[in-house]
């Protein structure tokens, strides 16, 4: 979990972690498809985690902690794989996780949210500028 020194990112990560632990029995259930589990993760955990992410300042340690949390959730959903060479079960590697999941990572999602927010702010500045310009002309 992200420490308190990281500022505002700590709070959404804490709530996302609580939500993850509440949903663990669904993620462990073998009768629920992986597709549904991924959808559940995308609609609950990701939304909580990226709440107000447009205004975050991400440091290298923040990005690392967010990626670790995301991979933890994916490992729980995707489960272990059977290694035929060693004839035992093992967890997925990071590379295997990212090849199995087609969704952008949480960091990429935050960057996209930030770009959308920047576009919105640029439009608002243009409207305010035009409004101010028209007001001056009178």
Image (spheres, helix red, strand yellow):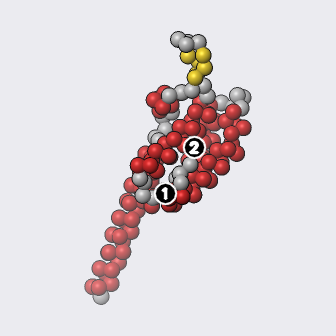
**Which residue is at the front of the view, 52 or 57?**
57
Task: Judge depth for marks 2 and 1 and give the one in front.
Answer: 1
Under circle 1, the secondary element is helix
Residue beneath disc 2: 42
| Residue lying at 71% horizontally and 32% vertically, measured from the top left | 29
Q: Earlier in the sequence, mark 2 or mark 1?
A: 1
Q: Is residue 71 above or below residue 138?
A: above
Query: What number is the disc on residue 6?
Result: 1
Q: Is residue 61 above or below residue 52?
A: above
| Residue lying at 62% horizontally and 53% vertically, measured from the top left | 15
Position of 66 compared to 82: left or right? left
Mark 2, Cα crowd under 10 Å, few <14 / some 14-19 / many 20+, is few
Q: Is residue 2 above or below residue 100?
A: below
Query: What number is the disc on residue 40?
Result: none
Mark 1, Cα crowd under 10 Å, few <14 / some 14-19 / many 20+, is some
Instruction: Let me know if residue 52 appears in the view.
Output: no
Whether pointer 2 and pointer 1 mark residues with C-beta atoms closer than 8 Å, the reply is: no
């Amino acid at each position: 979990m992200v420490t308190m020194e990281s500022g505002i990112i700590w709070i959404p990560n804490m709530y996302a972690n609580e939500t993850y632990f509440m949903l663990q029995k669904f993620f462990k259930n073998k009768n629920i498809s992986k597709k549904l589990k991924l959808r559940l993760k995308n609609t609950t955990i990701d939304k909580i985690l990226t709440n107000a992410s447009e205004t975050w300042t991400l440091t290298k340690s923040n990005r690392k902690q967010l990626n670790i949390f995301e991979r933890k959730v994916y490992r729980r959903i995707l489960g272990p794989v059977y290694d035929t060479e060693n004839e035992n079960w093992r967890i997925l590697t990071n590379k295997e996780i990212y090849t199995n999941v087609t969704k952008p990572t949480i960091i990429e999602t935050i960057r996209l949210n930030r770009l959308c927010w920047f576009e919105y702010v640029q439009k608002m500045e243009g409207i305010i500028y035009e409004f101010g310009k028209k007001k001056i002309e009178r």
